Each structure stands twice: as structure tokens, then as C-alpha cells.
Amino acid sequence: MAASKSGKPGTLTSYANAFMRQAFGFGISNVAKAQSRQVSSVPGTVKTIVIAIGGNSLIKDAQHMSVPDQYAAVVKTVRHITDLLERGYHIVITHGNGPQVGFILLRSEHSRGILHQVPLDSIVADTQGALGYQIQQALENEFRRRGLKKSVATVVTQTLVDGNDAAFAHPSKPIGEFYPRAQAEERMRVENWTMVEDASRGWRRVVASPTPVRIIESAVVRHLVKDGHVVIAAGGGGIPVVADAKGILRGVAAVIDKDLASAVLAREVAADLLVIATAVEKVCLNFGTPGQRALDSMTVAEAARYKAEGHFKPGSMLPKIEACVQFVAHSRREALITCPEALSAALDGHTGTRVVP
């Protein structure tokens, strides 16, 4: 057994602490500090839930990608969210925007030479407005059908990132279409894009995916929720912005993970629960293999071990697990991963996967 700095053998806690830091960027001490804080809801108060829905979930297949098709998918999703509103929860909805950003980039590319190009931060803002409008209208219509007196607001949301984040030096998030080599070389020379080659499909632009630090409009969201409004915010992870020494903001060409931004927002609005709505009802170990095993729950420490064992794929389940772990570790509250259809049952403890301290 390795010795500690005092010369005594390292304890199990010290090893677990080091393991947590390597897996998620913080140690058990952070969890202990969070647990020492009084953060539980006052009995009888209305509980607040942040629900993150994916941009891909709004597009069922290649034959249903139009705006009306996306709206039809939204209508189905908000029915399950409205079920929770009828049970008295306060709700903040976040959403992804990956496919929708891709569509706008494609339109911008095909109008090159005719119209100005649209910066990536403005594209994220565009998708927040468009998808927020769809979710907002679908909710309002569902309220009318059920006779609910609720109001909905979409907040165009900026997410602060660190301008020195290592992600800016090593862009890795692919966006937009594939280009032949000659076009790619021109884009890299003229537009100063970073591009990578996919041997079978061509060249594609990559941008930074920095860690979200703070949601600029979180106070606005918190006040709206407190007053009983349903709020749609942090769409696409939020519009990425950096601040100078005086706090002046400017947008940057980056993509923020929607689940990680949702965890930050949930923490800043003091949510009681973070829900990641995805395509599966439960998180599974050995997913897609004969040994697949669904999980009812996992602790923060267990999540770190499963991550180290390679059970969660980057760009798929991994960011969802990381978001849940970050929220739970910093708030002492719980997170839940399930599909939209199972939301009510999962909140009652009948399905879904809980991430607990």
C-alpha cells in the first residue's frame, strides 16, 4: 500500500478521492461539503425540476426532419411534461439543438456569395428562439386542452465560458457539412476554420466545446420559476460568451454541451431534481451486449467507477452521467435519467436511473 505524505499508508478514502478527481474533476471532499449544507426543500414547498430534452429527440428519422415534423415531436414530449405540472411541480426546460444548428449552417453555406454568413453564436441564439417558440406554443396548447392556468416564457440564454479553456486550443466538436479537400483548404485559409478529415466522407469543421461556468440569465430564470411560470432556457447549452476584465461579454464560436449547461442552471436556480430525458428508460452497463444490465440507481462514486471501466460513450451517455454527477456532487440532491414517456413513473421511483450522493 502506498504511503501518504505523513508516511502512513494511504487510506481507502484517499484513494477514492484521487479516483473521483481523475474521473470527474472533483473529489469526495466536495461531496462532503455539499452534504454538510442545508439544501433540502422545506416541507410543503413546491419542488423545482430542470428537465433537459435532446435536440435529436425532436427528429425521429431521416424522413421526418421538417419544422412541422419537429413540432409534432415536441407536442408528444410536452404532454409528459404537462403531466408533471399537473402534479404541482415547478419546471424549467432545457433543450439540445445539434441537428437544428446543422440545418442553419447548411443554409448559410448554400447562400454563400449571396447573403452574409451567420456566426455560430448567433446560430445558437436562432435555435433558442425557434425551438423555444415550438415548445412554448405546444405547452400553451396543451394547457388549454387540460384547462390549466399556466404561463410559459422562453429566455434567450447566454452561458459564460472561460476564454482560456483548453478546448479553444484543441477544437474537437464537429459541426456542419463535409467538404472536399480543395474547399476545406480554402475555408481554413480564408475563414481560419479548424477542420479534420474523415477518410470516407471528407473534411469537416470542428469548434471548441468549453466547460460551462455560469448561466448569465440564471437570476431571471429563478425569479420566473419562483412566480410559477414554466421557463424554457439554456437552449443548446446556451449561447457561448466570454467576459473581459471589466465583465463585458462577447460571443464566441463554440458549442456547449446541453446536459452540462443544464446541470449548471439546475444548481444556480436551486432545483430539487435534474432530469435528463433521453432515448432510453434506464442507463445500462455493457450497453448493446448480451451482458447488458440496467441500473436503478448509482452513487457518485459508482458513476466514477463505471466511467473508468468504459461503460459510457463520449457524445452519448457520458456527458449525461457527467452532468448528473456534477449536479449531485455540488447540491446533495438527486438526478434522474429516463425517457420522456416514463417521466411520471420515474419520478415515483418505478423506473429510470437515479444518480445519488
Image (tube, rainbow, N blue to C red):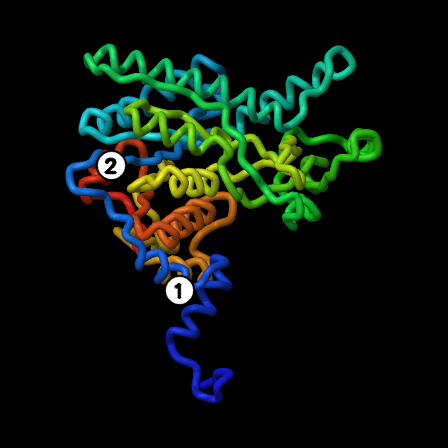
Mark sitting on residue 28: 1
Q: Is residue 59 above or below residue 257?
A: above
Q: Position of residue 266 (x, y in %)?
A: 38, 40
Residue density around tag 1, few if under 14, some if 14–19, many if 20 or more, within 10 Å: many
Q: Residue at x 63, y 32 (%)?
A: 249
Depth check: give the residue in front, 286 or 38.
38
Q: Position of residue 194 (x, y in %)?
A: 74, 39
- Kindly identify the amino acid type of the residue bearing the numbered disc 2: Lys
Direction from residue 344 to residue 31 in the image, left or right: right
Q: Are marks 1 and 2 in contact (CB under 8 Å)?
A: no
Q: Is residue 7 above or below residue 71?
A: below
- Kindly identify the amino acid type of the residue bearing the numbered disc 1: Ile
Residue density around tag 2, few if under 14, some if 14–19, many if 20 or more, within 10 Å: some
Q: Is residue 64 above or below residue 330?
A: above
Q: Secondary structure at mark 1?
A: helix
Residue sticking out furthest to the front: 246
Direction from residue 106 to residue 139 in the image, left or right: left
Quadrant location, the N terminus:
bottom left
Q: Position of residue 158 (x, y in %)?
A: 54, 31
Q: Position of residue 209 (x, y in %)?
A: 59, 42
Mark sitting on residue 47: 2
Quadrant location, the C terminus:
bottom left
Depth check: give the residue in front, 75 or 69.
75
Q: Residue at x 29, y 49 (%)?
A: 39
Earlier sequence position, callout 1 versus callout 2: 1
Mark sitting on residue 8: none
Q: CA distance from mark 1 to mark 2?
A: 27 Å
Residue 56 seen by the camera: no
